[in-house]
Amino acid sequence: MSLEHLDELSDAISEVTASTEYLVVADGKDGLSRSSTPTVLNACARHERFYLDDGSLTFIMPQSALVYRVHGSLFAAHSPLWKAKIDDQGIYAQVELKNIDTRDLNAFLSVLYPRSHYAPEERTTADWISILRMAHQWEFPDIRSLAIEKLRDLAPPVERLVLARDFNIPTWVETARSELYAREEPLSTPEAKRLDMADVVKIFTTREAALAAKVETLRKALDPRGERSVRDLFDDN
């Protein structure tokens, strides 16, 4: 390990352990809870893009051994959840993100800290899902709305229906189900496993009803007097 890296690591440890109290992201409703146990930062490196020297809010990712530093004022300005937490903790806060995926955090921070305001970054559907997940959990309403707008066109109907249930987007439920009613292929087993049972039943019963109506229309066309069974009609053809 180089002397420069040791100095950086020492600085990071000193900065994070300077406070006697810090926040820990846990499994609560808002993902945040308190802890008074110091976080071990050995082997944690500064994120190459999202460690800002003038930041006031430090994120520690133990699973990826990374330390992030961002501006608490920016978080407080865009999120009522973070405003309350930062106001309670003071200007400087240290946060251990035990249950946050590194890809989710990176995608989310790329919206708050774009590389350029004139050339938007290329993002995949998975990136926008990560952004939606973080914005929903951390209560960033504007970023949440942006992610919903992007995913409306990017995500296929099964994905949108899953997201609608996971992140409370009621306007997507019926539109996604309508697309699944109308498509030629039925739900696959992997798709059905991802959906709520109520949605699976609704999709199958609606498709079955539509098929029954088509069969009845065909029967009337082939046997307008209703004298033969549907089986007989299909046996003839």
Image: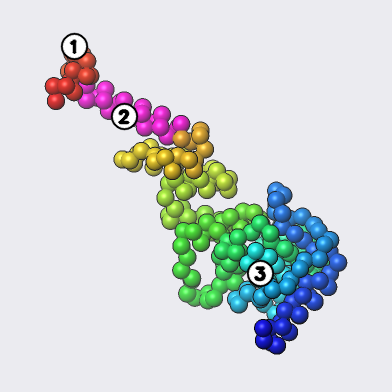
Dividing the image into 4 quarters, which one contains the N terminus? bottom right
Q: Look at 57% across and 69% down and name the residue there.
A: 110
> What secondary structure characterizes most of the magenta part?
helix
Secondary structure category for the residue under label 1: loop
Amino acid found under the numbered disc labelled 1: Glu
- Whole-Å distance between the Cαs marked 2 and 3? 55 Å
Looking at the image, residue 128 lies above or below residue 114: above
Q: Look at 66% across and 76% down and name the residue there.
A: 46
Looking at the image, residue 229 lies above or below residue 77: above
Which residue is disc 2 drawn over? 211
Which residue is disc 1 drawn over? 227
Q: Quadrant of the rendered structure where residue 204 is?
A: top left
Q: Look at 42% across and 50% down and name the residue there.
A: 156
- The image position of residue 178, as x and y in percent, is 41, 39
Q: Which residues are magenta?
A: 201-221
Work out whether residue 142 can be spotted.
no
Q: Look at 81% across and 66% down and name the residue there.
A: 38
The tag earlier along the polypeptide, 2 or 3, is 3
Q: Residues within 10 Å of mark 2 (few under 14, many from 20)?
A: few
- The image position of residue 193, as x and y in percent, is 48, 40
Dividing the image into 4 quarters, which one contains the C terminus? top left
The label number, if any, that marks residue 65 in the structure image: 3
Q: Residues within 10 Å of mark 1 (few under 14, many from 20)?
A: few
